[in-house]
Image (cartoon, rainbow, N blue to C red):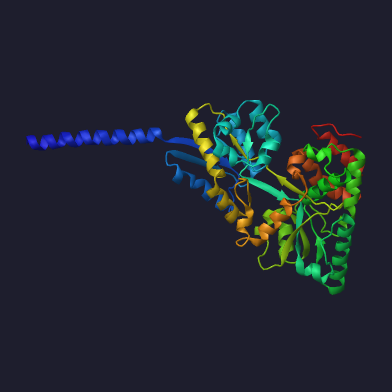
Amino acid sequence: MRKSKRIFIICMIGAVFFLSGCSERKEKQVEITVMHGWGSTEMDHKEMQKIYSDFQKKYPDISLNLIAMPTGKEMVERAEDRILVGDLPDVIFCGDAGKESLYQFMIENELALDLMPYIKEDKELLHSIAPSSMEYWKTRDGKLYTVSDVLMLGGGYWYNEEIFREAGITSIPETWEEFYSACQKIQTWSETSNKDVMPLGPTVEGYLYITDQMLAKNRGRGSVAISQNKVPMSQSEICTVLEQQKELWHYTKPLSKEYSYRDETDLFNDEKLAMYINGIWGAFMIDETLPVSYALLPFGEGAEIACESAGLGYLLGNTENEKRIDASIKFLKYMLSKEVQERILLKTGQMPANPQITIEQYSEKMPRFCQAATEVKQAEIKIQVPANLWNSAQMHIFEEYLPVFFQEEMSGEVFFQLLERNSQNRLKK
């Protein structure tokens, strides 16, 4: 009887220690909320969801509360709703959305964490951040509130080599005059051969790339406007560029509000378009059997121009909770680590932001992507992507009224006035 009682007491003591140990482990686990716009069922979205989830395998002491939305815009709206009721997320991946709303609001209300103190103390973190993130997003007082895990490389177009050859185009156009001539050759070939192929079919965003590069060209090489990441154009300049693009309009598929990059991608994959204006990330969306290459939009003067930008990326919440902030920094470092950056490249076709990743070593695995990246990297003149040069209201003006202008239902002067009205910086007349 005594022996049984002794065994019972020992078991009870053991159970107390076991439960105490479990309790301590639970107390040590920190939970952080991560919001992102990779919530759709598309392949790259699924891969990013898996990358996020795998963070917990590496850091089992951190519990990840993932909140996914189908798009960056929807995610920004959801994040704003949470913040307004006092529920500040630990990590928000903006995906280039919310620059004038969420980003500005969090900074103005001291809700965004300044990353510079952590970067200065952590060389590993410093060396994993793209210089373009620092250059564009660092504030005048030396603070940094956002870092992206990918770069946006663009300013060019994919072209069908076979269509170019059959249309008699023997070299890549280096000036806009040569580009218009190439469009005419494709259109003539298509009509005489009954091929139903259009030279190109840009989205409004595609026209914005063209607009920015024409503005840079018209203002001269290395223009002050572009180097300062602004578009301080005059009425005469914007009207000139709009008129220049009217000639392209004759060679393109008519724009509509419903027309998107998916439509343009489908047309190119069906060989109904000879050219496809998109960034290098388009490589993963193009049919692997098509004979395609990447070329930059023309600039002339023996120079090349392209876009290389770091968009609005991760915002970390200034929760004033040291454990949660440390866990959030670990999450950011995880996303910028070489291992994860390679996964992002190979699985989603996005350009890694970590400068320690050299794209050349992947040329055999992904030759199409690497050829496009090399074209962009080698360009002498670099400008920002449209999302970093125009505010969202101005981009909406292009989306809403560019087709109206092309159809002669609006003058360039009125178009300019709409841009000016929605500009944070007054434009010059």
As drawn, is 172 to the left or to the right of 99? right
As drawn, is 127 to the left or to the right of 195? left
The number of numbered badges drawn on the structure is 0
121 up-or-down from 351: above or below: above
Q: Position of residue 180 (x, y in %)?
A: 88, 59
Q: Position of residue 369 (x, y in %)?
A: 66, 58
Q: Quadrant of residue 365?
A: bottom right
Quarter holding the C terminus? Answer: top right
Tell me if I can see residue 260 in this picture. no
Q: Quadrant of residue 291?
A: bottom right
As drawn, is 24 to the left or to the right of 198? left
Quarter holding the N terminus? Answer: top left
Q: Position of residue 143 (x, y in %)?
A: 65, 29
10 up-or-down from 181: above or below: above
Q: Quadrant of residue 397?
A: top right
Residue nearest the viewer, comparing 398 with 28: 28
Residue nearest the viewer, comparing 271 with 210: 210
Q: Residue furthest left?
A: 1
Residue depicted at 19% across the width and 37% down the height: 11
Residue depicted at 81% across the width and 32% down the height: 425
As drawn, is 427 to the left or to the right of 120? right
Tell me if I can see residue 155 in this picture. yes
Q: Position of residue 283 (x, y in %)?
A: 67, 58
Residue depicted at 83% across the width and 67% down the height: 170
